Amino acid sequence: MSYGEGSPRPASGFELWSWFFMRISGLLLVFLVLGHLYIMHILNSVEIIDYNFVARRLANIGWRTYDWVMLALALFHGANGIRVIIDDYAHRPGWRTFWLTLLYVVTFILLVLGTVVLVTFPFPA
Amino acid sequence: MGLYRGYRGSQGQWAWMLHRLSGVGIMLFLMMHIVDTFLAGFGPQVYDHVMAIYRAPLFMVLEVVLVGGVVYHAVNGLRVIIIDFWPNALRWHKSLIVAEVIVFLVLFIPAAVIMLGRLFG
Amino acid sequence: MQVTLRIRRYNPEQDREPHWEEYRLEADPTDRVLDLLNRVKWEVDGTLAYRRSCAHGVCGSDAMIINGKARLACKTLVKELSQPITVEPMRGFRVKKDLIVDFTGFFAAYRSIKPYLINHDPEPERERLQSPHDRERFDDTTKCILCGCCTTSCPSFWANPDYVGPAAIVNAHRFIFDSRDQAADERLRILNSRDGVWRCRTIFNCTEACPRGIEVTRAIQEVKRAILLGQR
Amino acid sequence: MRAAVELAKYPDLKVAVVSKLYPSRSHTGAAQGGIGAALGNIEEDHWEWHMFDTVKGSDYLGDQDAIEVMCKEAPEAVYELEHMGLPFSRTEDGRINQRRFGGHTKEFGKAPVHRSCFAADRTGHMILQTLYQQSIKHGVRFFDEFHVVDLIMDGRRVAGVVAIELATGDLHVFHAKATLFATGGAGRMFKVTSNALALTGDGLAIAFRHGIPLEDMEFFQFHPTGIYRLGILITEGARGEGGILRNRHGERFMERYAPTIKDLAPRDVVSRAIYLEIREGRGIDGKDYVHLDLTHLSRDIIETRLPDITDFVRTYLGIDPVEEPIPIQPTAHYEMGGIPTDVDGRVIWDAQNTPVEGFYAAGECACVSVHGANRLGTNSLLDLVVFGRRAGRHMARYARESDWPALPGDATDWAREQVERFLTRQKGEKIGAIRARLQEEMMDKAGVFRTEEGLTEMEGILKELEAQYQEAAIDDRGRMYNTDLLEALELGNLLECARATVVAARNRKESRGGHAREDYPKRDDANWLKHTLLYREPDGSVRIDYKPVVITRFQPQERKY
Ligand SMILES: Cc1cc2nc3c(=O)[nH]c(=O)nc-3n(C[C@H](O)[C@H](O)[C@H](O)COP(=O)(O)OP(=O)(O)OC[C@H]3O[C@@H](n4cnc5c(N)ncnc54)[C@H](O)[C@@H]3O)c2cc1C
Ligand code: HEM
Ligand code: SF4
Ligand code: F3S
Ligand code: FES
């Protein structure tokens, strides 16, 4: 147990915003992700999806924005969720730092990768 | 997870564990998904090669699980949000779980049928 | 009727690991589990260690895990339970001996939320007035006997003993929503931290476990909302 | 704990609370009904009326100077609790709500009055919590789960206590300028009791062994409404809210015993009435219990004013008090006697009120005597806050003015010997068995009704049990959390208290308040309007002395309700 006798622990308000963000992003994700899944997996299917399919879809700037917003929200939402989980289970300070760093790095890389694709994907000439 | 064994908790406990599992699962998938989409940047051959893997039957079943996970996570997430922002919902929290299961089934069963139908059809 | 009682025992002076021990006893369906423990201690094996005092659910001494749920041994009747009856020490706490666990952190968490009325105004000659409606506002959480059933049933607490736990939040609620108290902001600030209310994931085990029938989750949610919206 | 809060206000003093339980587990938390004070929030009330009721309730054995102090300071003490944060139930205009309670009347006995200030039916719980909270606020140090085994004496002055730490089994010496005992009652000497398993009269026995007297130990209150067989209390508040006692014929029998205030007569009167009903064969189904009937009250009143007892009844009896009457029987409840003190909580040696330097007592273990031969409901909580506070003040003054008492070198010897005896002996009678016999026999022979014959027999039995106890053995020979050892020590204390009770009861040849002799059914003011003081001689025998009753305002009269 790490808290001292009767001493208030520091409060930054960060957890409040994290909590709030999880809920708001969750709400938006309901539409984005379920919509995405519906289009990709129900209306279409992996059998149909190929490079051309993706290319056609991304030709539309609207879809690009849709995908990017979804990507970013899902990443942040998911990463924050994982952060909470790490906080829960990784108690040794060393390990906790390790996992958290790993998470942040991976999230950042993925965000960059995802953004790069969406921005640079060649528009059909 | 050994910690959770043997405690006969409320339905809330199971709902939460599933939420956590599905959350992590989706996150892992998302990571993979970003990578594969990124590969699309390398041109059609590479991407189509990756998509071929997704078409393996095993992956198609996993896809169903993924959809189930997302649907569950979404529905349960909504339930949590309702409880958080609408005080009166606390009174009905048990009914909410029942409602959640129903909504989940209503969304998931048809989806699964369509998707598995493809696999076998 | 004949009952089988399985108790998870651990004696730090002898055992390296906890182990189960089984006792067969004659019991009435209306006996309390505490009666069974007493019978074991007084008639069979005096080394069995557990806490108890009031024997009717008002002192909060004998919280333990009975048949997989956090309960007070003195408020659980044999007839409510399926056989064999299993009794384990509270979860998420360090076991000191048999059913006795370390409460240090629990009370430290309780103290951390400043569990006392803070009011800087000069004291009136008679009572401070409070309408029945204002009194009603925190009635539920005044019932807490600090037994720890809620905290020991919370999966978030098992995962992370740094979480202040529902019991401390319940007691903070008791003051935050008391119209006579003036330190609500301070308590809210304390609870608005990583190990404060946000660790609660609305699992509801606590509400189910509370032997005083306190709607623990509701109290926690009210505190969360007070932090979020700044209103009481 | 009330004393500790008072003391903690003096920053130059170091205050510690030593308790064998976590303080929040003390039995004060079980008190349901309320705390009496003539606030007059519901109807007109005066402290003189309260005083009259208390004197009359005590069967004129209470010391009227002390009672006057208590009743006069009651409103202030209650307001103070309110200021500390105690969440009293409120009236419509925001004041502390009050209810009627047994024996509390207006205009010197005319009709029941609303005097008991309450927080639903968990007033004691709220007092305990509030005082614990205030102690935390004021930085009192707590030694939780330290069991006091012995008192340290420096000649005739008290120098602290010896306590065993439950977690480790270590003996600790607490060296103090002023020591206060608030160790609660000794109800566990009886089989059916509302008292906690921890109420084993430790403080009484410890003081007694050091030659400090015990006062009025023959007066033990049996509360009329304990849940049948379990002894769990159904508060008098249940009758305050309108509950009625009925026998097997459904008859409201209290009309015969107390025509004016009926079911709200004091506890000794009602308990005896129930016993008589049972003896006449009017118990329910001819068995040894009667019914407490709440069914004519609305569900709302029962559930909002008496939520806890509703819960007890539902849990332990599987009965809904809204629908069905509750089976009840008298239950051993309150020790009127105890360590004699003056109005400042100072323990005294003798009838001349010579104080024991550095030693204080408050609460149920003390005998100020405000309860005399029978305590009125709500007066115990009041007793402990009023006199706890006064004792705290006096202790502060005393501690500042006095030097440290010397700490004798052999302070822990007696305690160590007791502990080692049990830790080393291999074979002997089981503690549980001795205690069970004690409780059974006490209930039978020193319970609501007593006779010369029964008490004499009981003295013999006690000798036997005492001998067995000397040879008793325990199973647990470890050091850490040895609760087996503690129970053994507690039994020693119980036996001591039981003996004091029986000796005093046999000695007092009259019936008064909580002491009813079948062979002497009348009160006898000519010979017995005096307090008993018991001394334990070094050889273990008990010497009896007396102390006059202080009578100021109200002359003894026949006690009729
Ligand atoms: C069920 C019930 C209902 C009641 N209802 C009312 C009511 O409505 N109104 C009213 O006025 N009164 C009521 N009473 C009476 C009143 O509650 C008690 O008389 C009073 O609470 C006693 O308080 P206390 O502080 O003396 O003792 P307790 O609260 O019993 O405290 C004793 C303390 O001493 C400690 N202790 C004991 N022995 C040792 C030792 N050897 N070493 C260390 N610590 C020790 C214990 O750990 C405990 O903390 C009721 C009593 C009961 C049992
Ligand atoms: C579809 C809509 C979604 C909704 C409504 C939603 C809702 C929520 C909510 C409310 C929480 C917080 C739970 C709590 O505090 O108890 C949460 C946690 C989480 N979410 Fe989502 N989410 C959604 C999609 C996603 C996606 C797409 C991912 C993956 C990238 C994800 C991963 C996570 C993770 C890992 C957690 C943490 C789980 C935990 O702490 O137990 N969620 N979600
Ligand atoms: S809230 Fe309930 S379960 Fe938790 S400590 Fe208080 S009484 Fe026990
Ligand atoms: S079980 Fe735990 S997570 Fe919250 S609702 Fe209760 S505290
Ligand atoms: S013994 Fe007091 S709550 Fe169980």
Image: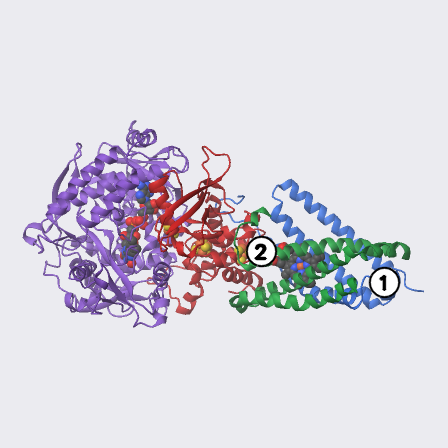
Q: Which chain is green?
A: B
Q: Residue at x 61, y 41 (%)?
A: A92
Residue situated in front as seen by the camera: D157 or D532: D532
Q: Position of residue D164 (x, y in %)?
A: 35, 36
Chain A colour is blue
In this figure, which residue is indicated by the disc labeled 1? A54
**For this view, does D224 lie left or right of residue A31?**
left
Query: Do the numbered discs 2 and 1 sit on residues whose CB atoms are within 8 Å?
Result: no
The image quadrant that residue D553 belongs to is: bottom left
Residue C198 - label: 2
Kindly tell me whether mark 2's CB lies below 8 Å from ligand 2: yes
Real-space Cα distance between discs 2 and 1? 40 Å
Q: Position of residue D535 (x, y in %)?
A: 16, 39
- Quick one: label 2, few (<14), some, or many (20+) residues within 10 Å? many
**For this view, does A105 lie left or right of residue D69?**
right
- Quick one: label 1, few (<14), some, or many (20+) residues within 10 Å? some
Name the element at disc 1: helix
Q: Which amino acid lies under the numbered mark 1 shown in the image of this protein?
A: Val
Chain C colour is red
Q: Which chain is purple?
A: D
Q: Position of residue D144 (x, y in %)?
A: 39, 42
The image quadrant that residue D231 belongs to is: bottom left
Residue D274 - label: none
**For this view, does C229 lie left or right of residue A46?**
left
Q: Are marks 2 and 1 on the same chain?
A: no
- Colouring scheme, one of rainbow, by chain, secondary structure, one colour: by chain
Name the element at disc 2: helix
